[in-house]
Image (spheres, rainbow, N blue to C red):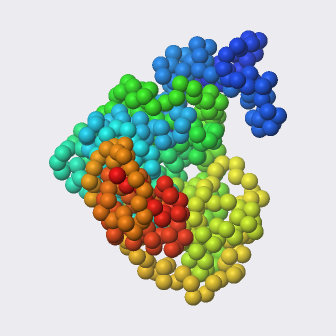
Amino acid sequence: MNGRLDHEPAPIYETLTNYVASGIYGFHTPGHKWGRFAAPELTELVGRSGLALDLPSMTATDNTFHPTHCVRDAQTLAADLFGAGSTFYLTAGSSLGISTALLAAVPPGGTVVIPRNVHRSVVAGLVLSGALPRFVKHDVLAECGALGVSASSLKSALEKDPTPSAVLLTRPSYYGLARELEEVAAVCHARNAPVIVDEAHGGHFCFMPGFAPKSALESGADLAVQSCHKTLGSLVGSAQLHVSKNSLVPADEVQHSLNFLQTTSPSLLLLASLDVQRRWLAREGRALFAEAGIAAQKLREEIAAINGMRVFGVEGDARLAGHSIDPLRLVVNVTETGWDGYEVERFLRTEFKVEDEMADQFSVVYILSPNDDEAATRRLVEGLKAVSNSPKFGVGKATLAGNVDSHLLQPPIPPLAMAPRDAALAKQTMVRREDAAGRTCAEMVMFYPPGIPLLMPGEVVTRETLEVCQKLLAAGANPYASDPTFEMICVVK
């Protein structure tokens, strides 16, 4: 984290408030006319001040396509704070940033090296860019999902023909795991392949030196995408795309690609939230996150002392060598109690009014933040104690020992019959699941958790993949597909 500029200005927020204070009446969009034509519920929801600042992109308020004043200045301050060469504010989440990065870094028909544990926005980026995926192997553990890709695995993937145009990695994982990135970046850069990092859940790393893994930018990434709303406190849907100071992908190419994808009507409320949170983080970010790190460690120790609860960590585990973990990602393995993660999720939600970020067969995952509510934290602890005091003996012991179907952890990658773009845009038809084997998939099929795509557009539907899908269905995982029951699959016609 740099912060060499004066971070007291909040250019977007100040431009909006000054415009409202000027007394101008706008005979332009938005139609709610700053609360005059808004439903009472909308006024109550957003507030009159929020509606007043809900302005469109125009000369007075700048724009995100070719910013010339407040948006430009706010993005410059963000780049300075996070140590980037350039930063682009996004109002459609990290998904917009991922697609933009792929469009900027990979030409149509080019190859991008990716692990299998990617967000669905990566698949959208493949379709939009026309890029071809080359999957790189990574290990998977039952209790924490996908591990980071090693430098040696990446080296092998990069040395195959055709030469890849870029590498895209997910870091940290949903379980907070982050592999050290410097060696990986060096391997990629030696082959002139830029490194794109989906750092959606790691925007706060640069504010936690000594606690958290190094940020992607500090570790050599060329492009890094962060969901600011996830851990940095801005409004939901706000994100940012960083271009490193020595990026192999120039910032003007990123802006060019972004302009094909972003809206001409970005929410200036989202942009202002990025702006004011950046100012607050420049003032107090390190102190707030340091306090949160200390509180998180105490909470981890307290929960680890509860009978049957195991708090996930990397210390002393040879399988996780080279990895570190987000201190604010609390992963509680409950299998020694005989409960599964889904059961604990429902129990704490209904009986203790505590909601988690996600659950799987083994664990529940909680995201901790600065200034978390102490009473709610106490309810979380008491809820886990209640689970501990109500064990379901004879259940879960085998899975704890690692007796898990390896196909469920990392199913075989189906062969690619068509480019993802060609399959996604081809004429399509729905077929019954049992009749889909041998057909070319036209959609993305994934089960949450673990959320790793089992089928992508262009891949052949195999009987082995269908068997994995059926096992996940039986285990209670939720299908994300055109047919939410997963009785039918969308294939190329």
Q: Going by the image, does 89 lie left or right of 322?
A: right
Q: Going by the image, does 218 lie left or right of 207?
A: left
Image quadrant assignment for residue 194: top left
Q: Is residue 6 above or below residue 91?
A: above
Q: Is residue 159 above or below residue 436?
A: above
Regarding residue 197, the answer to whether it shows in the image is no
Residue 221 percent location from the top left of the image: 37, 41
In the orientation shown, which residue stands out farthest toward the bottom?
A: 394
Residue 148 percent location from the top left of the image: 38, 57
Q: Going by the image, does 306 lie left or right of 350?
A: left
- Residues 75 and 280: in front is 75
In the orientation shown, which residue stands out farthest toward the left?
A: 161
Residue displayed at 53% across by 59% down:
484
Residue displayed at 48% across by 63% down:
486
Regarding residue 479, the answer to whether it shows in the image is yes
Residue displayed at 53% across by 25% down:
264
Residue displayed at 65% across by 75% down:
306
Q: Is residue 482 above or below residue 340?
A: above
Residue 215 percent location from the top left of the image: 45, 45
Residue 220 percent location from the top left of the image: 36, 41
Q: Going by the image, does 476 lie left or right of 258?
A: right
Q: How many marks?
A: 0
Image quadrant assignment for residue 404: bottom left
